[in-house]
Image (cartoon, rainbow, N blue to C red):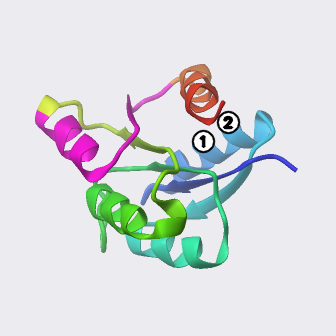
Amino acid sequence: MGKCIMTADDSASVRQMVAFTLKGAGYEVVEAVDGMDALLKLESTPVQMLITDLNMPNLDGIGLIKGVRANTAYKFIPIIMLTTESQDSKKQEGKSAGATGWIIKPFKPEQLLAVIKKVLG
């Protein structure tokens, strides 16, 4: 069984593209529509990695990361921010919250997979 990765993004097209890329590389994918949805799904679905957007309704990416890091089961899983935001201040905020890496949209599938392979081993 492949490793399971959650993708949280309020854009259906981005979720589809990420899921398509990951499934093609042999990963299982759980999709969440925002940070609140992601936190709820994490309670019942063990994942090895989280890929999240920054700007989402209900709970943004920073809030999601803080929520995930507060859960002892997910304290150390890799979390990648996949967002259109590229300002250093936003990156620093993400890093401070506990993000492992940062990818700017639009992304290239091979770039995403390279980052995942690097952090998941």
Q: Residues within 10 Å of mark 1 (few under 14, many from 20)?
A: few
Q: Residue furthest left?
A: 89
Image x and y of residue 6, in percent: 59, 56
Left or right of residue 97: residue 68: right
The residue positioned 64% from the left and 58% from the top of the image is: 47
Q: Quadrant of the C terminus?
A: top right
Closest to the observer: 19 or 28?
A: 28
The residue positioned 67% from the left and 36% from the top of the image is: 21
Q: Residues within 10 Å of mark 2 (few under 14, many from 20)?
A: some
Three-letter amino acid code at disc 2?
Thr
Left or right of residue 92: residue 55: right
* Gap in angstroms between the C-alphas marked 1 and 2: 6 Å
Three-letter amino acid code at disc 1?
Met
Image x and y of residue 67, in percent: 36, 68
Magenta-span inclusion, residue 63? no
Q: Is residue 7 above or below residue 88?
A: below
Disc number at residue 91? none
Indicate the quadrant where residue 89 lies. top left
Q: Is residue 4 above or below residue 43?
A: above
> Mark 1 sits on what residue?
17
**Count of labels in the image:** 2
- Tell me the mark number nearer the camera, choosing from 1 and 2: 2
Would you say the residues marked 1 and 2 are in contact, meaning their CB atoms lie under 8 Å apart?
yes
Q: Secondary structure at mark 2?
A: helix
Range drawn in magenta: 89-107
> Mark 2 sits on what residue?
21
